[in-house]
Amino acid sequence: MSKIKDWLSFKERRLEKYEEAKKEFCKAIGKPVIMIPLELPENLMFLREDFCALENDEEFIKRMQRSCVRYLKRRFASKISEHQKNAGRS
Amino acid sequence: MSVAASSFVMIYLLTLLLVATDMFPMSVAALIGALFSIWIGLSYGVFTYNEAASFVDMKLIGLLVGTMIVMEVAYRSGLFRLIALYTIRVAGGDSRILFVLLCITSAAVSMFLSDSTALLLIAAAATTISRIMDYDPVPYFVAASVMVNLGGTSTLIGSVSNMIIGLSAGLSFSDFVTYLTPCELILWMLTTATLYWLYRPKLMGKREVPKYDPWEGIENKRFLILSAILLLIFLGLFTLHKSLGLPPEAVALGCAILALAISRVDPSEIFRSIDWETIFFLGGFFFIVGGLERAGILDDLAREFIDMTGGGEILLSTTLLWISGLASTVVSNIAVALTFTPVIKSLGLKNPFAAWSALVFGSNLGGAATPLSGVVTVMALGALKREGFKISLAEFTKAGMLTTFIQLLFANLYILIRFGLL
């Protein structure tokens, strides 16, 4: 039985190529998603568990999303205005 | 039957059983079988150590490894992904058009890529677009596995069993095109139509597809263009290899070296991507079949074939097609091709092309009949499971069996007409 389990997990490993290809397709067609490592500051180590729970905290994700939009708008203001001009023309 | 001969038959059957039941990885099962075959052969003096060493066809291994390297480089360049992205864009969000186009793309891509790589690529494309458009991915997955299996039948390099048959029979790349391509094209249409008919109720209407540029996802366009050029050279040389006096394995290995030179990818990464499991399975099975051949079992089988069919070519080709077709629904098509190749040689046919074509069709077409018939169907089910979708084995078998039956029936008719047997 354990041999069968080993063999099935061996076949699962062969699906790694599938995951890689899926990521590439998502990048091309779907909405791009980035994953960034966030570290808990040394002085807040006592909040370790609360920090880890942020991964699934919807409020936190929304705030990060808004912060990301603000940053992109500030950082790439000229690109955005150029895009809006072109969109207006077409 | 002598003790040695019956031992070889037992080893052969046990190996097939181990492979079919997935008790061991297929490479390990074949290597265990090889070990026992060599032991029996040497103990009973059926062959010497040096004779056993010559069982492995290094030309075939060269052709296989060379082709795998060229295709891996082309795959990494994003060429096949670009084709899949254009296919999705051309469908314009219409799930029915997308279904038909993905069927054709699956078969076309599988003419070059290994079946497993082609399936994973198309499955990834199908999952992505299904998630975005909220389509049911099951019809696309089933269709992709059936069509990938079919597409591999088309060329000398499309599947390992084709390489085995092609090298043994001395069939060139252009012979495959001449004898098999007309039938293949009709089979593509017939199978696509059957799958469409089966899955039409599950295919939803049209939805707006997000705008995207297929070229945007390509990191290194120069590498992609070079890979495309190399692939054209590879196909050109394969088409002309007989007139140029170049053996196919030399073309494959030569192009593999060029591919490694242009890819700028760490070669060890490319080598890791080679399907070593298939190569070791093939290596092991050479010894098992070698034992059967030396013990005279395959000659006996050839005589049985002639007795059974009365030596008539119509019955012989038909029997060969259906037996190899049914066998490949249960056991690996590589094992089927390796077993029947020496049998056809022993038949001593004046015009063996009908028999070779029957074996090509038979050994390939059975590979997607049931969920466990081949690596393609197992992978499609694995990917579907990973995505959280379920498909009953009965539903998969219904589609697989129906399309396999239609394909074998049409291939039979084609062989009888094409080779003037009627």
Image: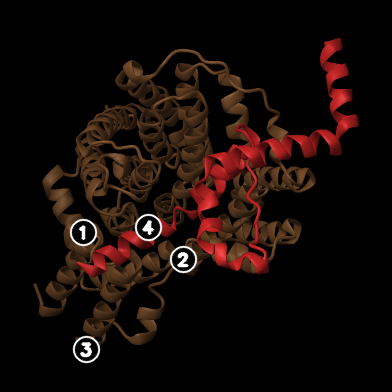
Disc 2/disc 3 C-alpha distance (Å) = 30 Å
**Residue at point 53%, 47% (across, down):** B113
Would you name the residue on which mark 2 appears? Answer: B276
Disc 1/disc 4 C-alpha distance (Å) = 14 Å
Chain B: colour as depicted? brown
Q: Earlier in the sequence, mark 2 or mark 3?
A: 3
Chain shaded red: A
Dot 1 falls on which chain? B
Asked whether disc 2 touches disc 4, contact meaning CB atoms under 8 Å apart, the reply is: no
Q: Earlier in the sequence, mark 1 or mark 3?
A: 1
Q: Quadrant of residue A74?
A: top right
Q: Nearer the viewer, mark 2 or mark 4?
A: 4
Q: Rate crowding at label 4 as few (under 14), some (14 to 19) or many (20 or more) other CA atoms within 10 Å.
A: some
| Image disc number at residue A11 | 4
Assign a secondary structure to mark 3: helix
Assign a secondary structure to mark 4: helix
Disc 2/disc 4 C-alpha distance (Å) = 14 Å
**Residue at point 29%, 37% (across, down):** B390
The answer as to whether the residues below labels 3 and 4 share one chain is no
Dot 2 falls on which chain? B
Q: Quadrant of the C terminus of chain B?
A: top left
Question: Could you tell whether A13 is left or right of B329 in the image?
Answer: right
- Name above or below for residue B88 compared with residue A6: above
**Residue at point 67%, 56% (across, down):** B255
Q: Position of residue B74 (x, y in %)?
A: 64, 48
Q: Quadrant of the N terminus of chain B?
A: bottom left
